Amino acid sequence: LLPTAAPGVTPTRVMTIAGSDSGGGAGIQADMRTFAMLGLHACVAVTAVTVQNSLGVSGVQTIEPDIVAAQIRSVTSDIGVSAVKTGMLATAEIITAIADAATEVGIGGGGVPLVVDPVCASMHGDPLLRADALDTLVGRMFPLADVVTPNLDEVRLITGIDVVDADTQRDAARALRDLGARWALVKGGHLRGSDRSPDLLFDGDDFVEIDAPRIDTPHDHGAGDTLAAAICGALSHGYSMPDAVAFAKGWVTRGLASAYPLGAGHGPVNPLW
Ligand code: PLP
């Protein structure tokens, strides 16, 4: 996957629908870093502003749902996008506005590829989605999604399945698929007690395991966002889903290996070619 940005040439455009991290590690900032490194032009629909540093989130201001939807309509009616990802969506009202706008402009549902990262909380446990919004996230965004990318905590919240091994990871993939996404990716990065980090991708027929070494670092802030953004970037270049996820897994593994300390807490992943 090579950058497509060249002088005077309009690059492939993608969009992230997500929250801002003032510390520059996760959220929109992580997505834009990955998009820029892949030679893509990054469009943004901001859902929320988080007050955040390396120690956690201390405040959230959500954006009016109409303004979130208007950002999507404005970008797609003029600039156009080849793939979209969603991250922190914050509230049921924002999710409803996004799902309505996405349906209207042809994002997801077999149109423009859509990666839905069902972000619920930060690694510090700070809520990034209101508890009463989970049903709306699943009910409205999953049926539109080409792939959903929950971590194991999100899998437990969404399906009730506690993934502890390869069998339960398969059960979770089946349960997620049943909720309407075309592909389910069950990330194994939070499976403890292994020197591997096996992710499992499932389309209802075939399981694809995407394995990588576990990188032992406290500096993994924004790893999930970066993975989903890299999948989105690869899809915008026409990759198949298994190839896009394999590319993204390598991308985030290298990003973890070259992550850097920042502040007194968790530093960000640092994607590098
Ligand atoms: N802040 C924002 C705005 C996010 O979107 C996310 C993850 O999606 C996070 C923080 C949490 O990142 P992490 O769990 O890597 O700390």
Image (cartoon, rainbow, N blue to C red):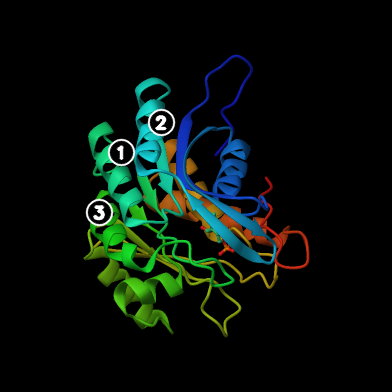
Q: Nearer the viewer, residue 50 or 167?
A: 50
Residue, disc 3: 140
Q: Quadrant of the N terminus?
A: top right
Amino acid beneath label 1: Ile
- First in sequence: mark 2 vs mark 1: 2
Q: How packed is label 2: few (under 14 Cα within 10 Å), some, or many (20 or more)?
A: many
Residue 202: image tag: none
Q: Position of residue 52 (x, y in %)?
A: 64, 58
Residue under the image location 41 percent in, 41 percent down: 84
For label 3, the SS is helix
Assign a secondary structure to mark 2: loop
Type of residue at label 2?
Val
Amino acid type, mark 3: Arg
Give the x, y percent position of residue 223: 58, 60
Mark toward the viewer: 1 or 3: 3
Label 1–label 3 contact, CB within 8 A? no
- Residue 226 screen position, x and y as percent: 56, 53
**Tag 1 residue:** 107
Spatial separation of the CA atoms under disc 2 and disc 3: 21 Å
Whether residue 224 appears in this view of the structure is yes
127 and 212: which one is in front?
127
- Left or right placement of residue 182 versus residue 253 in this view: left
**Left or right of 243 in this view: 170:** left
Figure quarter occupied by ligand 1: bottom right
Q: Nearer the viewer, residue 261 or 147?
A: 261
User: What x and y, as percent, mark residue 144?
Assistant: 26, 49
**Residue at the spot 35% in from the left edge and 82% down from the top edge:** 167
Between 185 and 1, the one nearer to me in the picture:
185
The answer to whether the residues at label 2 and label 1 have Cβ atoms under 8 Å apart is yes
In the rendered view, would you say 199 is above or below 192?
Answer: above
Q: Secondary structure at mark 1?
A: loop
How far apart, in angstroms, are the residues tagged by discs 2 and 1? 9 Å
